[in-house]
Every structure is written in structure tokens, then in C-alpha cells.
Image (cartoon, helix red, strand yellow):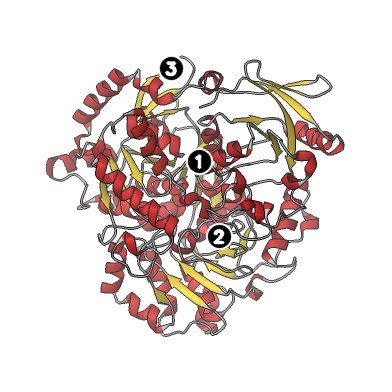
């Protein structure tokens, strides 16, 4: 019999019961809650007279709606609908007794930054949240994926999900990453290769020496965007880095339980003879710094490339998508990526707002200035703790000296549900995860890049190859 | 949840691939704390020429007359015909809420994004996967025939064209059962409460750190 994949192991360990019709009840260890996708779930609980099955399994914080300028109380949020949503979460967590890291708490931040940082999420767990980027948490060797609001309610009420086992997929990235190539470039490259539907129906494990060489933050960036590759869940096997990352976190076990946990966590890797339904192999040496040019994350190219000609695309559906993307983005085939000028730059989001991301951006910004042609550069740490650490390292001073803005934690310009947004027609170098039409503001034009590439674009006023940036600047 | 048994509905074609949930219902409408009322803002950025805001009277807004759902022949459509990877991106359940609130009960595509697909079933909306060649043919027929309808039979698992031709589709038995009967699956899961308690007791022995207060 073939060995088990990491996903097989996680699935088997959480199987409560299997039904005759092929569906299963899967136990959920952690639910992370934010203000946007939870109000209707709490309302549903109330209407049915139900209580949370296991209150301690839930961790709530505020991220999507919160302004990133300083404020101390929800009542200061100017936008009525945002304020009501924030206050609704505060009311719901209070009345159901759910732990919340609220406004003014240093632990408040983007759900997928807060959860690993607190040790709320640990290897071997099943983790859900009403947010598709929940896959981020899979970097710790857990089964983590986004769910809809009906399932948020279902998990609150039963601590389980009705699920069907997904297929197994592995993307192996072998070899050494070149200089200037980051986790973000790796995952954008993968999406460029397999497409935004490439992982549909699969649990996606990232493996290979290039993935192993990444820090935990880098692995989180990769797993974060598995959903942009079509896979609800992304994951990486547990190794020494995973265990070192978890040690000492507020909600991690200690003493004897820690030793017991580590012994179990070390088994959380795909067996050598495990079989994957889909296997993709990528040579790390081929990956270059990436820039997305269109309105789907699969419309992505190496920074040195020129924009593709739709006429050379043989698939009619893809061709019409490209034509529409060119129209929306205001770009033309044959144009060089380095000739795309940027109006704003956003460094943040659940993809790239951890300390390592801020360090990489600061390294580029150090001693340099934002281009006069760039209207705004936002640097938004993923949590209050990331912000504090960055300030201890002096990163905020580097950004401010470069003319960048240093903000409070939140989702910010990733999705324009708060005051940070693009104006119609503006091009943005963004470290976020989606370049969909209107995502960063109605009519806004998003280009997905790594933190270093975003900072370099802020300085140059257009996209530049980070590998040659030092010489040019 | 409303039952879904059979549907004889007008078909509207949305000839785009990778339609994401940000497009289905843009972010500003996610600030609602309700499940209803999203229909007027379905595909907001494509349907209207200005930027929509929650609470605005949508009847006064300038329509994008080129957008397919604004064409008179597709008014009252209950079946959306579209292209591959429909519903990709954000997990927002507001997407099926908006489609349902607008009047769509079934969506036909060559493929769907996983989370959206799952969310549809929780709301009485049936996502139907048909082969790409069949989808191509349906787009042609819809285009050529004003008032084009399809008959969807969930119990029989087929889509029937006006000429009587039937195409079968797959559906997960549990989801089919819930849709046919309009069942709330929380109640069903709670029937297994003993199994959940037993599972927790066993896990707690092996991995006590999972069970923080």
C-alpha cells in the first residue's frame, strides 16, 4: 500500500464519521473570525437558539474594515457601514464569550498574520475562517482553508464541517532560488504555470528544496496564494523551522506537552512513497522576479518580459480574457513591463505584511526616496506585534525618510473596504494577492509583486528588476 | 433554505472565464450584516456606469446597456450560463446570496472554483458542471434564440434543451439530498453529536494542547 500524503494524514486525524453517501464529518480545531463574514453566522446561531460548540476554539480580530490611520475606538470609524460591522463583531464576541483581539490590542491584525503569530494555529490542526486566504496557515503543516458564512455558522454550532476528501497535488520546487527571487515570485511563477484553476479540487502541498529553504514567513506567502492557484488549502511539511517558529508562542504548549507535540508534529510530512493525483515539478533556477500585468493572477510574467500578444493565444476563452484585461488595464501588447509606471504602491496584506516582508522593502528604501511621480506609498504591517517589532528595528524611520507612509495594521488597500484605495485608472505596485478588476478600488489597476519589487517601483516610479536596481539607482 | 427540485428557466449568457467573486459582488457591499438585498448590486461594476455604494437607490444609476444582464431579452433569467472557473477568488458567501437575490437558481459552467461551488449548495443555488463542448453549443443556442430556456431536473440529474436533448450532470449525493429537501445541515450534523463528543475525548488525550479554553 502506498504511503500517505501530508493531507491524507491531516484528514485521517480529523475524521469524526463517514457517511454512506461519501461525505464525512471533519473536526475543526480552530476557527478564526473577522468582522466581514461572521455577522450572518452569529445571527443564524441566535435565531436557532444555539451556542458555540467549543468557545475556546475560536479566535476573533478585526482587519478588513479598520482604518490604517491611528484610532482608538470603533465609534471613530467614519464610514457608517464599516463601523456597524466592526461593532457587530465586538457585540457578538462579547455575548458569545469568544476571545477577540480588538482595537487597541497589540495582537490585533490581519487574521492570517495574527493566528500563527499567537500560536493560535499549530501544526497538525484543522483551521478554517470565512476568508479564502486561510490557506496561509497551512505553512505550519496544518489543513487550513477558507469557508463561506453558512459554514462559519456550522463550525460555530458543531465544531465540524461536512466535507468530501479532496485530491492530492504536490508542487515541487527544486534547486536554489536566484538572487532577488522571493517566496512571492515563487508562488506567482507557480500560478503562471498551472493557472488560477490549476489546483481546483485539490489540497496543494508545496515541497522541494527551494520551499524547504524558505523561512516560515516565506512559506506563509506561498500557502497564502494557493487559492489563487485554485486550491482551497495549501500546506508545507513540518521541519525544524516550523517547530522553532511555534516554540514560545502564547497559545503553544509548554513543558511535557510541548515535547509530546513536537514528537507528533515531526510525523507531519508526506511519506516517501506517497502518491499524488497531480504532481508539478518546477526548477527554482528558472524563477525570476514576477510582475502581474492583467486582471487574473495567472496573467503574470518575469519583470524583463514584454506583454503578450493575444493573437498568439490559441485558446479562444483565454484570448478574449486577455483582450478584456488589456482594455481594463490600459496597456498594449508588446509593451515592456519596465515601462509600466505606477501611481501608488501598497506594501502589506496577508500575503506580505510580516516582519521579513517589511525588512525586504526597507532594505530597498534605505537611503532612497519615493519617486515624485508616485502619489503614495503605503506600508501596512500585518499586526500590532509586527508593527512594534519593525519599529524596534527602525524600519519605520527608513520608510518615513523615503517618503513612504507607515500605517496601523489591517487589510488596507488589498481590498478597498476601508479608506485605503486606488482611484480609477491608477496603477499600483501591490504586494497583495489579487489583481481582479476593481479589487483595490473601482477602476484601479493592480500589479502583483514582491515587497522588494514594490519598494523598488516606488523609488523608480516604474517597474524595475530588483536584481539590477542597486546598480541603476 | 429553499428546496431545489426542477427549474424551467430563462438562460442569460455571461461569456467570460474566471469570473471572480469580487466581480459578482464588489467589496463595498460586503459591509452589510444581512444575507439579503444584494441582488441590485450583483455584477455592480459591470452593470452600472458609476460606482455603487451600499444604501444607494440603484434605480437612479446609469446602466451599462452593453452588459448582458441589462438587455431586455434576458430580464427574468433564472439560469446563468458562463465559462470556466466561475466564482474564483474570495470566499464571500455574499456571491451566491447576490445571485440568488437577483433571481438565479442555477449556474451552468465548465468548472467552478471550489469555495464558491460549496457555498452555492448552502443557499439553494445549483451549480452545474457541463462539458466545454456542450457549453459552447449552449452559448450559440442562447445567442440565436430569444427567450431560450433550459429545464433542470435535480432528481434526474439532467439539463434538457428546448429540442428535448438531455445532458446528464454529476452531483454529490449528500448535497443533492439537502437541496432536494431544503435541509439545514447544522441540524443533520448535530444528529452526530455523540460521535463528535467521542472524537473530542480521544483527541484530548492525544493532543491536549488543541483544547485551550
Please give left or right for residue A461 compared with residue B157 in the image. Answer: left
Q: In this figure, what is the number of numbered marks? A: 3
- Mark 1 or 2: the one toward you: 1
Q: Which label was assigned to residue A80?
A: none
Label 2 crowd bin: few (<14), some (14–19), many (20+), radius 10 Å = many
Residue nearest the observer in this picture, A268 or B116: B116
**1 and 3 marks in contact (CB < 8 Å):** no
- Counting residues from the start of the chain, the first of labels 3 and 2 encountered is 3
Task: Answer with the quarter of the image where residue A216 lies.
Answer: bottom left
Q: Position of residue A176 (x, y in %)?
A: 47, 59
Residue that mark 3 sits on: A19
The N terminus of chain A: image quadrant: top left
Res. A5 in view: no
Q: Position of residue A97 (x, y in %)?
A: 23, 41
Marked residue chain, label 1: B
Mark 3 on the same chain as mark 2? yes
The residue lying at 38 percent from left, 44 percent from top is A237
Alpha-carbon span between mark 1 and mark 3: 26 Å
Q: Position of residue A278 (x, y in %)?
A: 56, 37
- Mark 3 or 2: the one toward you: 3
Please give left or right for residue B67 compared with residue A417 in the image. Answer: right
Using the image, determine if residue A448 lies above or below residue A391: above
Q: Position of residue B163 (x, y in %)?
A: 84, 22
Marked residue chain, label 3: A
The residue lying at 26 percent from left, 23 percent from top is B197
Q: Which label was assigned to residue A287?
A: 2
Question: Which element type, helix, strand or loop, lies under badge 3?
Answer: loop
Please give left or right for residue A128 compared with residue A417 in the image. Answer: left
Q: Which label was assigned to residue B93?
A: 1
Residue extending furthest right?
B144
Amino acid at each position: 500500500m502506498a504511503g500517505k500524503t501530508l493531507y491524507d494524514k491531516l484528514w485521517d486525524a480529523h475524521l469524526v464519521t463517514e457517511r454512506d453517501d461519501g461525505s464525512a464529518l471533519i473536526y475543526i480545531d480552530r476557527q478564526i473570525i473577522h468582522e466581514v463574514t461572521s455577522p450572518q453566522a452569529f445571527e443564524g446561531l441566535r435565531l436557532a437558539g444555539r451556542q458555540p460548540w467549543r468557545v475556546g476554539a475560536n479566535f476573533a480580530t478585526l482587519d478588513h474594515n479598520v482604518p490604517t490611520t491611528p484610532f482608538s475606538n470603533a465609534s471613530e470609524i467614519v464610514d457608517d457601514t464599516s463601523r456597524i460591522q466592526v461593532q457587530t463583531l465586538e457585540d457578538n464576541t462579547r455575548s458569545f464569550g469568544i476571545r477577540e483581539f480588538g482595537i487597541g490590542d497589540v495582537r490585533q491584525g490581519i487574521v492570517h498574520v495574527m493566528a500563527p503569530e499567537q500560536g493560535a494555529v499549530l501544526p497538525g490542526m484543522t483551521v478554517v475562517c470565512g476568508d479564502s486566504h486561510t490557506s496561509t496557515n497551512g505553512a505550519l503543516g496544518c489543513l487550513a482553508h477558507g469557508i463561506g458564512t453558512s459554514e462559519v455558522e456550522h463550525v460555530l454550532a458543531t465544531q465540524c464541517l461536512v466535507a468530501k476528501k479532496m485530491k492530492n497535488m504536490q508542487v515541487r520546487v527544486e534547486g536554489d532560488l536566484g538572487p532577488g527571487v522571493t517566496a512571492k515570485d515563487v508562488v506567482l511563477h507557480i500560478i503562471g504555470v498551472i493557472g488560477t484553476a490549476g489546483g481546483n479540487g485539490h489540497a496543494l502541498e508545496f515541497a522541494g528544496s527551494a520551499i524547504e529553504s524558505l523561512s516560515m514567513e516565506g512559506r506563509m506567502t506561498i500557502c497564502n496564494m494557493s487559492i489563487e492557484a485554485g486550491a482551497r488549502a495549501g500546506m508545507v511539511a513540518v521541519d525544524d523551522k516550523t517547530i522553532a517558529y511555534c516554540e514560545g508562542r502564547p497559545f503553544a504548549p509548554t513543558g511535557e506537552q510541548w515535547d509530546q507535540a513536537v514528537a507528533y508534529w515531526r510525523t507531519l510530512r508526506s511519506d516517501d512513497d506517497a502518491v499524488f493525483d497531480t504532481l508539478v515539478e518546477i526548477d527554482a533556477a528558472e524563477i525570476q522576479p514576477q510582475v502581474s500585468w492583467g486582471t487574473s493572477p495567472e496573467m503574470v510574467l518575469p519583470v524583463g518580459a514584454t506583454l503578450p500578444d493575444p493573437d498568439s493565444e490559441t485558446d479562444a476563452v483565454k484570448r478574449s480574457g486577455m483582450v478584456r484585461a488589456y482594455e481594463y488595464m490600459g496597456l498594449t501588447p508588446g509593451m515592456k513591463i519596465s515601462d509600466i509606471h505606477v501611481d501608488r504602491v501598497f506594501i502589506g496584506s496577508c500575503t506580505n505584511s510580516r516582519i521579513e516582508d517589511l525588512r525586504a522593502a526597507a532594505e530597498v528604501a534605505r537611503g532612497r526616496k519615493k519617486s515624485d511621480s508616485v502619489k503614495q506609498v503605503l506600508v501596512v504591517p500585518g499586526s500590532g506585534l509586527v508593527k512594534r517589532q519593525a519599529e524596534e528595528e527602525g524600519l519605520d524611520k527608513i520608510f518615513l525618510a523615503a517618503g513612504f507612509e507607515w500605517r496601523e495594521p489591517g487589510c488596507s488597500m488589498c481590498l478597498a473596504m476601508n479608506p485605503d484605495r486606488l482611484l480609477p485608472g491608477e496603477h499600483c505596485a501591490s504586494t497583495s494577492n489579487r489583481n481582479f478588476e476593481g479589487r483595490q478600488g473601482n477602476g484601479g489597476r493592480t500589479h502583483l509583486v514582491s515587497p522588494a519589487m514594490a519598494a523598488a517601483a516606488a523609488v523608480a516610479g516604474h517597474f524595475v528588476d530588483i536584481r539590477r536596481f542597486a546598480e541603476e539607482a | 433554505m429553499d428546496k431545489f427540485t426542477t427549474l424551467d428557466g430563462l438562460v442569460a449568457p455571461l461569456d467570460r472565464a474566471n469570473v471572480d467573486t469580487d466581480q459578482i459582488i464588489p467589496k463595498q457591499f460586503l459591509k452589510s450584516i444581512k444575507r439579503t438585498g444584494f441582488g441590485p448590486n450583483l455584477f455592480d461594476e459591470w452593470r452600472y456606469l458609476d460606482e455603487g455604494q451600499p444604501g444607494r437607490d440603484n434605480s437612479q444609476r446609469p446602466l451599462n446597456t452593453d452588459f448582458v444582464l441589462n438587455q431586455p431579452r434576458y430580464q427574468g433569467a433564472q439560469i446563468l450560463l458562463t465559462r470556466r472557473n466561475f466564482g474564483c477568488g474570495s470566499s464571500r458567501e455574499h456571491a451566491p446570496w447576490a445571485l440568488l437575490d437577483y433571481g438565479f437558481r442555477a449556474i451552468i459552467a465548465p468548472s467552478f472554483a471550489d469555495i464558491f461551488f460549496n457555498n452555492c449548495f448552502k443557499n439553494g443555488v445549483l451549480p452545474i458542471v457541463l462539458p466545454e463542448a456542450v457549453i459552447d453549443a449552449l452559448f450559440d443556442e442562447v445567442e440565436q434564440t430569444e427567450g431560450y430556456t433550459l429545464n433542470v431536473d435535480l432528481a434526474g440529474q439532467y439539463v434538457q434543451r428546448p429540442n428535448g436533448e438531455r445532458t446528464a450532470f454529476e452531483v454529490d449525493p449528500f448535497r443533492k439530498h439537502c437541496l432536494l429537501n431544503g435541509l439545514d445541515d447544522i441540524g443533520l450534523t448535530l444528529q452526530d453529536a455523540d460521535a463528535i463528543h467521542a472524537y473530542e475525548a480521544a483527541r484530548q488525550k492525544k493532543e491536549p494542547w488543541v483544547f485551550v479554553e
